[in-house]
Image (spheres, rainbow, N blue to C red):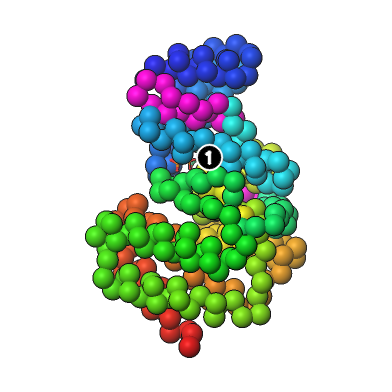
Amino acid sequence: MNWQAIVENIENATGAAFKLINAKSLAGGDINSAYCLQGVDKSYFVKLNRAESVEMFASEAAGLTELAATSTVRTPSPVVHGISAANAFLVLEYIEFGSSSKTSDRLFGQQLALLHQQQQPYFGWHRDNTIGSTPQPNSSNGDWIEFWCTHRLQHQLQLAAAKGYGGRLQASGEQLCEKLTQFFDNYQPHPSLLHGDLWGGNAAIDKQGNPVIFDPACYYGDKQADLAMTELFGGFSQDFYATYRDTCPIDTGYTTRKKLYNLYHILNHLNLFGSGYLSQAENIISSLLSEIR
Ligand code: ADP
């Protein structure tokens, strides 16, 4: 990798000299390769992918900017993104992570609830983005059920069909889409700013004890969609949920709705990582269909 070109991009964006000492490869990303560019008194976090992925990085930078503007949960500041030779790159502020504590978890629940209080008049976002490397359409819509049906479930079902996961999954998925209104009896979602991909691997605590969220797939949607994902792969503590609930109370219908929301991520995992997720997706759909008329 020609790090000099990335260093020049950093220097042009920040207007400050940056002398690279070491480029350290980091583990943990599902989609991109990640590095810490260590300088004398400053470091940067860099993600690399193929040149075609530059729009993915542009939307990630836009998402981080949107989240930062709320002054709720800490996010790494975007520095610069672009293409260098065969690579798309995204440079962010490098944040050193520490360990979580009861206090930091409680703060995280409270800050996420405050993020979810940031609302706009319609569901969606001003631009499309990606979730993992899957395209995520965000066309604006005043109707959440229609948005979830078209831009989330049917979108992933169509991608799955194109990858050969048609048949039963498609038929039961369509059946579910026709009945979505039944999951929203006595519940009126509002368009809240969401992280959009909030599993434990996209959240951490910095050295000062502040929660940090990164790698977002932002849009404005039902806050319970973000909350549901925190429960999908574990990683969030009871202290986190306790303070979240203090600010954003959770209705009883959430228990079922959470399955509907996490179905999107399981379908996305099917599309990203393959058939290991097929039976899980089918089981969630069956379970949801069994709960309605
Ligand atoms: P991917 O897009 O490939 O999933 P992530 O954005 O999740 O990559 O980043 C990969 C890993 O790098 C994360 O799990 C996290 O540990 C670390 N990381 C992410 N952002 C930063 C940052 N700004 N500073 C330091 N480490 C980071």
Q: Residue 67 at what x, y percent from top left?
A: 65, 44
Amino acid carrying mark 1 in the image: Glu
Q: Residue 282 at what x, y percent from top left?
A: 34, 72
Q: Residue at x 54, y 80 (%)?
A: 182
| Residue beneath disc 1 | 60
Left or right position of 92 against 190: left
Q: Residue 54 at what x, y percent from top left?
A: 44, 32
Q: Is residue 62 visible?
A: yes
For the record, the magenta segment spans: 80-101
Is-magenta flag for residue 84?
Answer: yes
Q: Residue at x 55, y 45 (%)?
A: 127
Position of residue 98 relative to residue 275, above or below, is: above
Q: Residue at x 45, y 28 (%)?
A: 89
Left or right position of 230 against 55: right
Q: Residue at x 47, y 63 (%)?
A: 150
Left or right position of 30 against 36: left
